[in-house]
Image: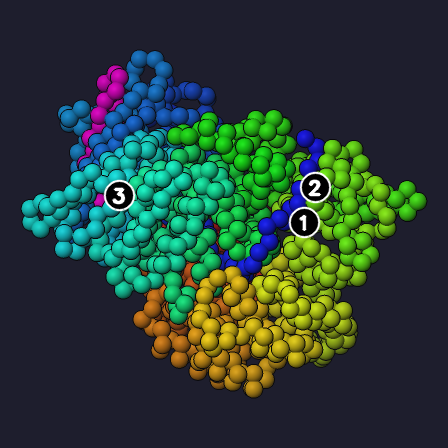
Amino acid sequence: MQFTAVNVAKRVSRSTWIPFALARPWALNGTQSTSRAFATTTGARYSRLSDVRRRPYLCVPARSSTSVIQAPQEEKSGVSEQEGDKGALNSMAKPQPVYRKDYKPTPYLIDQVHLTFQLGEEHTTVLSDLHFKPNYQGDSPPEVVLNGRKDLKLQSVKVDGKDVPQEQYEVSEKLLMIRGLPKGPFNLQIETQIKPQDNTSLEGLYKSSGNFCTQCEAEGFRGITYFYDRPDVLAKYTTRIEAPKGPYPVLLSNGNLQASGELSDGRHFATWEDPFPKPCYLFALVAGDLAVSKDSFTTASGRRVDLHIYVQQQNIDRVAYAMQSLKAAMKWDEDVFGLEYDLDLFNIVAVDDFNMGAMENKSLNIFNSRLVLASPATATDDDFARIEGVVAHEYFHNWTGNRVTCRDWFQLTLKEGLTVFRDQEFSADMRSRGVKRVDDASALRRAQFPEDAGAFAHPIRPEEYTRMDNFYSLTVYEKGAEVVRLYQTLLGQAGFRKGMDLYFKRHDGTAVTCDDFRAAMADANDVDLSALGTWYQQAGTPAVKVSTSYNASARTYTVKASQSTPATPGQSHKDPVLIPLAVGLLGKSGQPLALHLQGSKANGSAGDSAVLRLEKASQEFVFTEVPEEPVPSLCRNFSAPIKLEVEGQTEDDLIFLVKHDTDPFARWDAAQRLGQALMIQLYAAAADTSKNGSSSLAERCSAAGGVKQSLVDAFRAVLQDKALDGAMAAALLTLPGPTELQAMIHHADPVTLHEVRKYVVKELAQQLRPDLEAAVKRNDLPASEEYSPDAAQAAKRVLKNKCLGFLAALGEPAVYSMLLQRFRDASNMTDEIAALAALTECPCKERETGLSEFYQKWKDENLVVLKWLALQAASNVSGNLAAVQELQQHPAFNIKNPNNCYSLFLPFVRSPVNFHAGDGSGYRFLADSILTVDKINSQVAARMASPFTQLKQFDSERQTIMKQQAQRVADTEGLSENVFEVVQKSLKD
Ligand code: PHE
Ligand code: ZN
């Protein structure tokens, strides 16, 4: 296969704009638990738990990969680095990276797990009965080394029912080691005690709103009992739950309910059996007082599946949309991938305290309540779209993640990249394909590109990690999804489907690698896809330069493309990657030209796009029979996650593309490029105070030409185009954001950059006022029409609210009171919050009125209060830090709840004015907050620390003060491994 011509944006319907934020479950993680791969030594001296004291490891630099390598296979026993932190037993706990290359299977397999939970308010007892099977060579049984956590209290260890003598086992904060095991299979019985009520890490078994729940991915199961806590040990589970019936009437676990009944003392029990072998990270348990909403789905083969969504009683009227989304997802997976659900019951449980978005535990998905609960009054259009996407995402994991799982955590993108790709395609089919693609591409650029260019840059399949939790990243998820999309772009939809079918046929019920996925795709289509391998190894966003030339007499059009990937930390050399570059050519009047690509089998075939296969550092492609000099439309449908530079592309070309390009992404991208060029130019003028130091920023900008008429005209055309989908129009009217601009202007001052952007918005608002006002009117929902979160209605709202945002920038009292009125009159949360958001950026009395009325109205609704926190925290009103600090003390704010932290600290960081305040107060506040949160929940704290990985982007003064704060965090005694890994990388030169 050489060139494929595909129509890259086929199914276009309608949609809504879904911003990125926390849509994905990619929060970070943390407990004080382990990191694996201590170099193993033979004859290690094991100490009792009391002998092993954790030492602040912070002064110890992470070891280089070579220093961890030991004489290979030195361990006679067959114990490997990957099977447990055996080293932690005899060395002090220093954070040690684990390496992908060190993978070894465990010396035993566990194929049956029987768990009994005796849940209690004081403590919970966990009885674990494990069936071990030899997986080692030779006939002397090696030790069993299981993962644990320091809050596990070991009560007893038995082998085949007999107590293991004390001298035959050792236990530390992170491990349980047992030796002297019998030959052949045996049963190991372990009793542990835990205190879920004290578990603030929200990993393992914990309590949320009075209910018990679990979170085991990635390494939380070791907080429940000692186990091979790694994804390649697959077992069948039965789970018996015993609890007081009064407070915990609902008892749930994976699989099918086998038995339930009463016990003495007002207790009851339920026994669940999961017939599918699974890794322990997919284990789940829920016990509590929950209301349930029931529905069912009949599969293509006619099986009835019961669908249950459990929530707190007061939320039972807010689950309909999640249920509808679940059914749509089940149907879609049958239609598009031929994948049916495999059990008779599918449960979703919503909990308020959750580190991430949601979790795909087998048949018992657990969700952050913000991704389940929705009503028009309390949820925005974006919330609805996110719920639809995430419910589908978790459901899709049943095949991509659960039935076929990951061999080790380095392969995380195998399940996440693929499942994100699947949820993107699902949402594209439910809503507008074009807008969805723009949305995803835009989010990738805004958030993942900086990650790929910063101190934490890593390949989608990392080579090493210290805390796996830190690698639930935009790179693994979102760039990973783009890499999966490369297969589909190269193979076409039918070829991709063939590859998926073979992948399941080969690997169902097993734990595999990204290479296995690529092999299935290649073999099913009989093509060589080895060139895609580099995408898994290299960090950094490839930069592609394109230049074009037209030969009128030969009627040929030549596209020259070259690529390079910038160096990233620890990876200076980069190879070229395989980049499918989708291209269309537009003639003078905007019409698509027929494509004839020299030397291509795909010559002249389908559609008006061709996919160029760029795989060398530099290549030339020649189109023949080109009747006139075309305007090229490049990287259509965002065919690869690259940064594209088009030599000689003029402003006229871009305006032409905004007008005529039929590819939604390329059209949007052209508008972005216009905005970028303008703001880069104005920033230079604004930052240069040498000529007229006393002038205002606005004066310097307008002296430099201000906002060009051509851009105003292009925006006006969008506003006046009544046929255009509102969500697409809103996207076209969205100027490039601060993070993208920051990356384009070397060491820019973020506050000046923000002011320039504000200047541009205000200029546009002034010049477009009548069109903005008309668009608002045109898109207001008639009073007679009822709210619906569907894409068509949402598209009107997103455009209307975009226009209101522009109008707010005018700074006029009349506009402020109009916004306050709209806020008060709003019939749904989307409009209510949009009007308030516009006001929140303006220092006016309506801002305060609106914020306080909103709080009074919604103070009893947790999820709505989160929006209130986030709006204020992100505000660029100057001196807003004080307000944010006050919010931290507000009765509505609960620092133990991850959503609260995500809604206060993360939005604050997005305020250029206040986070990047020149006096360093914003950075200091962040550092203080990280340290406070770290003591409660280190996953959340590590996520908060990620802005430090970007510090090199800023001007040198800011770099200095940011570094000081990162250093202060790094030097703090008792810091978690999670936060340490992030700040330590940020501080490396
Ligand atoms: N696996 C979850 C998802 O992407 C995310 C997650 C990871 C949730 C770790 C909790 C803990 O669907
Ligand atoms: Zn996922």
* Cα separation between marks 1 and 3: 45 Å
- The colour scheme of the drawn protein is rainbow
Can the viewer see residue 116? yes
First reached walking from the N terminus: tag 1 or tag 2: 2
Find residue 353 and report its horizontal and vertical position in percent: 33, 56
Q: Secondary structure at mark 3?
A: strand
Quarter of the image where the N terminus is located: top right
The residue sitting at 36% across, 59% down in the picture is 320
Q: Are marks 3 and 2 in contact (CB under 8 Å)?
A: no
Find residue 986 and report its horizontal and vertical position in percent: 53, 50
Find residue 289 and report its horizontal and vertical position in percent: 21, 56
Mark 1 belongs to which amino acid? Answer: Arg
The residue sitting at 41% across, 20% down in the picture is 74
User: Overall secondary structure of the magenta stretch?
Assistant: strand
Q: Which mark is residue 606?
A: 2
- Mark closer to the observer (1, 2): 2
Left or right: residue 615 compared with residue 125? right
Left or right: residue 144 compared with residue 556? left
First reached walking from the N terminus: tag 3 or tag 2: 3
Q: Is residue 699 magenta?
A: no
Could you classify mark 3 by the number of other residues whose Cα lies within 10 Å: few (under 14), some (14-19), or many (20 or more)?
many
The residue sitting at 65% across, 54% down in the picture is 665
Residue position for label 1: 636
Mark 2 belongs to which amino acid? Answer: Ala
Q: Give whichever of 260, 833 is nearer the camera.
A: 260
Q: Secondary structure at mark 2?
A: loop
Could you classify mark 1 by the number of other residues whose Cα lies within 10 Å: few (under 14), some (14-19), or many (20 or more)?
many
Q: Which mark is residue 253?
A: 3
Magenta highlight range: 176-194
Left or right: residue 247 compared with residue 688? left
Residue 350, located in which quarter of the rendered image? Answer: bottom left
Mark 3 belongs to which amino acid? Answer: Ser
